[in-house]
Amino acid sequence: MREPAKAQLGAIADNRVIGPITQTDIVRFAGAGGDFNPLHHDPEFVAKSGFPGVIAMGQMQAGILSGWLSDIFGVENVRSFGVRFVAPVFLGDTLTVGGTITAIAETDGETRAEIDLTVSGTKGPVVTGSATAVVAKD
Amino acid sequence: MPELLHSGELDRVEYDIERGKIREFARATFATDPVHTDRDAAQAAGFTDVPATLTHTVVAGHQRDQRTFVEALGLALERVVVGSVKWTYLRPLIAGDHVVGTRRVVDDVRREGKRGGSMRILTLETEYVDADGDPVVRLEEVLIERGDHR
């Protein structure tokens, strides 16, 4: 297997910027995941719902966050990944994905990093989260 | 009227982990590690085939009827939001795996809101097992139903 990534406490150097989010991005995620709630693709339905516009599914932002995480640490090294949905994402929002390593400790014979995660939209956080991943001591 | 399955089981999904679906899901979530899309890269990294991305179990959405499950819980769909989701991994899901996920209610509480309304907070846990019956990933979802007064 691959060597775990070297890690040190503090902000993870490479952020990822995704967007502006388009209807195509949302439709592609709907097809992948199977969420066909019309709030995510039907403007007429949305107009009756009280939302000011089509919103992305929270799982899309969660998936974007987890993709960034596993690209850095390796999917086989992630032991847990959790998210809280803080605010909706609208068409045209640009998302910035990042994280901070808050602790590195030995657990079950592995060196594991605790990572705080955030996806921010144009007006602030949309998803916050945390993860645990196996790392190599830097 | 839908009813809960025996022993607190809410629903069950069963699917194959497919190379094409892994690729679709990786693209839809902007994951760039080639292990998800290139079998040679996956094998060079020590996997037997391409691994799924971390939130791949979302594909269960293709099998689930959200309305039926919300009704089975006695929740009002228009007042329900998903508060949080957490995955715990025992090993990566790999193309060729066959998984069965069983979802249960593990907590169901009411909490008084600051403005007098009451919220119902439901915690659901889905355990996925592989073809050998060994657990591979656990998923915890917290659903929040807001009170119906304004």
Image (cartoon, rainbow, N blue to C red):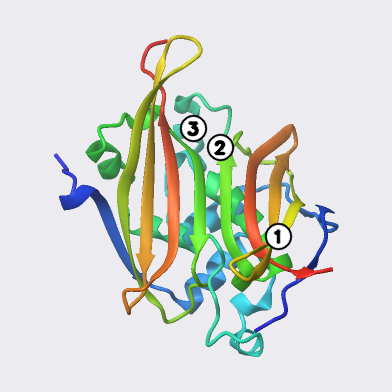
Residue A91 place in picture, x, y as percent: 64, 41
Q: Is residue B99 left or right of residue B40?
A: left
Secondary element type, mark 2: loop
Q: Amino acid at mark 2?
A: Val
Residue B43 place in picture, x, y as percent: 60, 89
Q: Residue at x 25, y 43 (%)?
A: B68
Q: Amino acid at mark 1?
A: Ala
Residue B37 place in picture, x, y as percent: 60, 78
Q: Is residue A63 above or below residue B68?
A: below
Q: Residue at x 70, y 41 (%)?
A: A92
Secondary element type, mark 3: helix
At label 1, counting other C-alpha atoms closer than 10 Å, the crowd grade (few under 14, some 14-19, many 20 or more) is some
Res A105 label: 1
Q: Residue at x 44, y 76 (%)?
A: B18
In the image shown, does B77 or A69 lie closer to the viewer? A69
Secondary element type, mark 1: strand
Choose top left, top right, bottom left or bottom right for residue B74. top left
Asked if the residues shown at circle 3 and circle 2 are in contact, with their CB atoms under 8 angstroms apart, the answer is yes
Q: Which circle's residue, 3 or 1, is located before the other in the chain? A: 3
Dot 1: chain letter: A
Asked if badge 1 and badge 2 are on a common chain, one would say yes
- Give the CA separation, mark 1 to mark 2: 42 Å
Q: Amino acid at mark 3?
A: Val
- Give the CA separation, mark 3 to mark 2: 6 Å
Q: Is residue A62 visible?
A: yes
Q: Quadrant of the N terminus of chain A?
A: bottom right
Q: Is residue A118 above or below residue B95?
A: above
Asked if badge 3 and badge 2 are on a common chain, one would say yes
Residue A125 place in picture, x, y as percent: 70, 37
Instruction: From the image, tell me which residue sits under label 2.
Output: A54
